[in-house]
Image (spheres, rainbow, N blue to C red):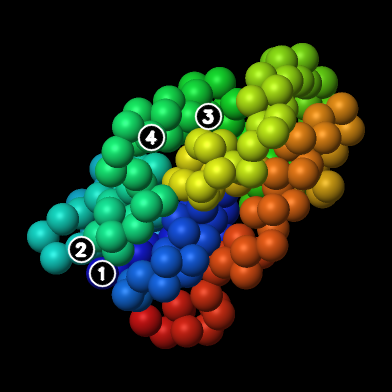
Amino acid sequence: MKLYYSDTLNPRKVCALARHLQSPVEFIWVELGMGEHRTPEFRAMNPNAKVPVLVDADLVLWESNAIMCHLAEKAGSDLWPKDARRIEVMRWLMWDATEFAPLASVFYFEHIIKPRFGIGKPDAAETEKATPGFERYAKVLDAHLKGRRYLVGDALSVADFAVGITLPYAGKTGMPLENFPEIRRWHARLDALPAWREPFPPLQAAQAA
């Protein structure tokens, strides 16, 4: 399997999961600053011109959550449950994609992406606009996590890797988590996983692939 990635938000969760599962993937670095994701060759794999992309024999798969589910299932891992919990995991994947992530990502974009790619300075107006919605959904997440080790019962799942992915950047981005102790506790548990803390392979090895 080949995993095309860069060190940005959605590839981060796939790389973290792949390393956590010790999946037999070849990590292939895509230099976004050079536009490698917009070449005809890359668009042939993903017409959206985005990372990550997984190539597994004849299967070419894009969308980070789908890739995570595929990797977990291929590994025979319960991170993508085979029982009734699968629906609950799917619910949190969808909730994150439609509610939480679009707002949390504003903080990431303004404070991480803009400086990195030289597309402007962080705009306080944008993060201020996103804050009420972020806090609304953070309240939902915080309440759900009370008394739970992970999002779905007491078992780690792909939902944790998805919903938590902006949290490693909370300190750098000013994400307002002060009033959400359960989220902070949950993320501390994720942060105990080596693959969560260090999701990306050594860059030299990936560039040489």
Residue 162 percent location from the top left of the image: 51, 42
Name the residue at 65% across, 54% down: 190
Find the residue positioned furthest to the left.
58
Q: Say whether disc 1 or disc 4 marks the residue closer to the N-terminus.
A: 1
Q: Which mark is residue 96?
A: 3
Which residue position holds label 4?
85
* SS assignment at label 1: loop
The residue depicted at 30 percent of the width and 63 percent of the height is: 75
In three-dimensional space, the C-alpha distance between marks 4 and 3, rounded to whole angstroms, equals: 17 Å
Cα gap from disc 2 to disc 4, whole angstroms: 26 Å
For the residues labelled 1 and 4, the Cα–Cα distance comes to: 27 Å
State which tag comes first along the sequence, 3 or 1: 1
Task: Please tell me how crowded label 4 is: few (under 14), some (14-19), or many (20+) other residues with Cα within 10 Å.
Answer: some
Name the quarter where the C terminus is drawn: bottom left
Residue annotated with mark 2: 56
Q: Identify which amino acid the numbered label 1 is placed on.
A: Met
Q: Is residue 104 left or right of residue 12?
A: right
Residue 35 visible somewhere in the drawing:
no
Whichever of callouts 3 and 2 sits on the residue coming sooner in the sequence is 2
Task: Say whether marks 2 and 1 touch (CB < 8 Å).
Answer: yes
Seen in the picture, residue 139 relative to 97 is either above or below; the reply is above
Q: Amino acid at mark 4?
A: Arg
Numbered badge on residue 1:
1
User: Reading the chain from its start, which is encountered first: label 2 or label 1?
Assistant: 1
